[in-house]
Each structure stands twice: as structure tokens, then as C-alpha cells.
Image (cartoon, coloured by chain):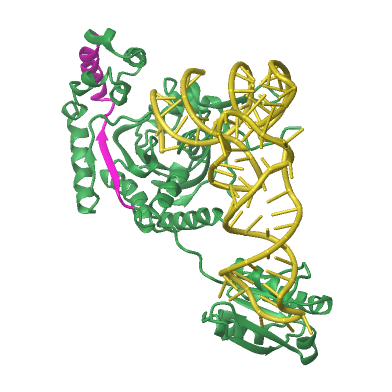
Chain colours: A green, B yellow
Amino acid sequence: MDKITAPRGTQDIIPPGSRQWRELEAAIGDLADRFAYSEIRTPTFEATELFVRGVGETTDIVEKEMYTFEDRKGRSLTLRPEWTAGVVRAVLEHNLLNQGPLKLYYTGSIFRYERPQKGRYRQAHQFGVECLGYADAAADAEVIQLPIELLTRFGIGGLRVELNSIGDAVCRPAYRQALLDHFRPVADQLSADSQRRLERNPLRILDSKDLRDKPFIDRAPSYLDHLCADCQAHFATLRGHLDALGIRYAVNPRLVRGLDYYTRTVFEVHSDALGAQSTILGGGRYDGLVEQLGGPPTPAVGFAMGLERFLMVREELGTATESVRRGIQIIALGQAACNRLVPVLAGLRRVYPEPADMDYGDRKLGAQLKLADRNGARLAAICGDAELERGILILRDLETKEQREVTLPAGTDVGALLTTICQMAAAPAPALLQE
RNA sequence: GUGAAUGUAGCUCAGUCGGUUAGAGCGCCGGUCUGUGGCACCGGAGGCCGGGGGUUCGAGUCCCCUCAUUCACCCCA
């Protein structure tokens, strides 16, 4: 019988690495809160049609990367390949825009059917925000600032912030025509991919990495020269905000992005620590999407960050925090002590806000201390027959080796024990006790 | 979807020209230390050598197929 393994491109998040995820998710929640974003959770799968209409029929995501299946009634459903379409759907379904601007954030899985490689998985995790209802460039600046704040908080530097504007419905047609005029005469010299893109989505030729395309791309007209007055003003205002916020960035006129819904601002943040998939986060403005999905005309801007990639960069840069000793390991020697300490453990878990654990394996003292050490406990509470007789517990600080005797609590009443534990661990006593 | 590399113990990896009983370090369990962890020393458990077929007296090693992983292309988080 073959061993069953996790499906291709998926990963188990297991200890001790799962701790990094907890830390990251906690920081995300805190930061989103400070920026006044509220959490939204949407279904893991949606009607396939939502992504086709939202993300765009000619995108790689829709053309070849979706996990699509039929349910028992023959409805076509798709595991979300990105969050924005589903969030906008939920916002419209619940009429959340009726109360003015709306700021939402999410964290969770996305699914794309791709060959896995470094920083690319079939199930990945993203943190992102959607800022709905603001046309002003201050919103764009906020949406760029937030993830950079997160990266900074984790000490991650050496990043490249790239920025571009890809115009709006007013100036897009003229620029598209300019691109066609530039590429059509040399179409037969372009890569097969780019020839296909020419008629369907000429903007996408700009981010081709094919060497045959490069000379033509280098000479292609820049959108920045074709922006309409409004788009130009928006871009200038955004740049002013970013400068004022002290965010360093590079304007990259070739930056386009693979999703069809972007207008005006697009941006990406790259790290050299990631290998070929260097994008740690990306986003932009999507002023047409809400309307396209059946809602009122609504300006919007957002970003999405790859959590795997974030953690990979952090790992690479060695900014992960070391774990500190904390909590208590209860060591019972013999059955009588074990019976006596089970309620003590239960009592501690009610009032002591750190990990409290006990080995149920009837191991000798040395082995149990070793276990406590490995578990990263700060204190050990030792009790065998001798201590039972005297009605005490021995508290040992695993770091300083200091030992104290304390009276053995009766049942789950661990108040006095807790005081000593907090003294020894040099931790402030919980409010419960200070009353 | 295309290409390349790699699959040997829980983990990281040796394994010569095909040769007899498959190795190390770390980790795990136990002992030295009848009740005090990290260190040291000693011992032990743990392997269908990814799977299938072939060549051979003999295959972890050579050949074919297959599966998986990794990296890269396309594109993105």
C-alpha cells in the first residue's frame, strides 16, 4: 500500500514552524486594527462565474490555474484563486457599501493549479486588504504603507517597491493603440506567447521576460507618457504621499500585473531572498471591478501578500525571534503524586496564563526534567512520596536552578502557588491575584 | 503544460569498479547518576535503499518504466 502524502503543492504547517505563523497572524490582526480595517471571511469556494468575470477571462489564472469542479447538482464551483472577487461579491450581497467607505482585511488560503516551485504552491496563504469607496490617492498610499509597516515590524529590509500607473478607461484605448502600432509591424519577431497577447491583451507583452521580446519592449511607448490628465494628477499625488511617508520606491513603467481589473495605481514589493518568485506582495487600484460585478460605481484599492513568501524572506534574513522559556512543567513521581497533582494542574490552567503541562508517562525524575527542558518550560514543580508526606512541592527554576519549597495546594485551589510561580518567573502576577 | 536535478533511518547525508550482515552525525529510548535537565561517555531501538520491471551467479549501485520532491520556464502571492 502506498503511503498517502499531502497533495502536490500543499504543505503541512507543523511545530515548531507553526509558531511563526501564529506570530505573523497576530501582527496582521494588530496592524489591520490600527489601520481601521475589519476582518472579512468569505467561502473557500465560489461560483466559477465570479472569478471569470472578476479576474478576467484572458488572465492566466482563469485560463489555466483554477481548481474548478462540479457539485452534485452540476453547479460549477471554483476554489478561490484570489480573495478580491469573493470579497466584492460578499460586500454587494450584504449591501455593505450603503454605509459609506468600507475597509476590510482577510487572511487565508488561495488555490492555483500550477507546477510548484520555490515560493509557489497550489495552496498558498494571503493577507490582504480592500479599501472601498475612496478615489483619492491617499487611499492608495495607505494601502501601500500598511504592508510595508508589517515588513518593517519584522525587521525585513532589502526590499524593492515598484510603482506604476496603467491608466483608466479614458486613456487606456489610446495607449493600447499606441502599443499595437509599436508591436504589430514586428509581430513575427515576437515570442509565440507575446504574439498571442498582441490581440487579446497587448499590455501583458510588457512584462514578458522572453529575450526575443526584450529589445521591442525596451523601445515600446511608456504608459506614463499617455496618461490622461486625471490619471497623471492621481499618480503625482500618490508619489507625493509616499515621499511624505518616507517610503522609497522605483517607478517601473513595465509593471503591469496579471489581473485584468487594475486601473491607475499598480505596485509590487520584491525581495531578492526569494529566488525566481520574488514578489512578496502586490496590488493596485480597481475602480471598475465593483460595477463590473453588478454593484454601484465604486473606487477601490487593495493589496495581497503571500504569507509563505513573507515567512521565507524572514527565514532567509534570520529575523525570526528566539523562543523564550515560559510556563511550568509539573513533575509527578509515582501514582499517588500523579493523582494529587492532576487537580493542581487543572487549577493552574485556569489562572496561570502560561503553558502548564505534566508528563503522564511515569518517567523518572531525570527524564522528566529533560522533557521539561526540551518543552521550554521556565519552571518545574516536583512532587514525589517525600514531598507528599511533608505536604510540599519543590519549585525549580530551570534557568537559574533556584529551588523553593511551597505548600502543596489542596485540590484546584492554587492561589498561593501561583504567587510564588509569578515571583520566580519574574512575571507580573495576573490581575486576578492583585485584587 | 515543458525542462533539469534528486529520491538510502524521524532529520541531514555517506555508501568506492556491481560483491557477502546497509553506515555516520543529529534526534529518540535506556544506563553511568536507587530523586535533579542542558555536558560527557556507554548501550539500544529504528531501513521493502520511493515503487515496478529488466540485465547479472549477485543490484542501494547498471538499464527501462512509473511515482514523488526540488529548482527553473510560463505567470504570479
Residue A195 is drawn in which quadrant? top left
Judging depth in this view, the residue of A398 and B29 nearest the camera is: B29
Q: Nearer the viewer, residue A368 or A26?
A: A368
Q: Please name the residue shown 19% across and 30% down the image.
A: A224
Task: Classify residue A208 as left or right of residue B33.
Answer: left
Q: Position of residue B44 (x, y in %)?
A: 75, 57
Q: Residue at x 56, y 79 (%)?
A: A430
Q: Is residue A52 magenta?
A: no
| Quarter of the rendering occupied by the C terminus of chain A | bottom right
Q: Quadrant of residue A48?
A: top right
Confirm whether the magenta stretch covers residue A171. yes
| Image position of B63 with respect to B68: above or below | above
* Image x and y of residue A192, in percent: 36, 12
Q: Which residues are magenta?
A: A157-184
Q: Is residue A142 visible?
A: yes
At 27% from the left and 47% from the top, the residue drawn is A138
Disc tally is 0
Q: Residue at x 53, y 24 (%)?
A: A49
Q: Position of residue A319 (x, y in %)?
A: 40, 57
Compare residues A364 and A167 and report the one nearer the observer. A364
Along the line of sight, which residue is nearer the eye, B25 or A171?
B25
Q: State which quarter of the image contains the N terminus of chain A.
A: top right
Q: Position of residue B15 (x, y in %)?
A: 58, 38
In the displayed structure image, the side of residue A254 where residue A283 appears, left or right: right
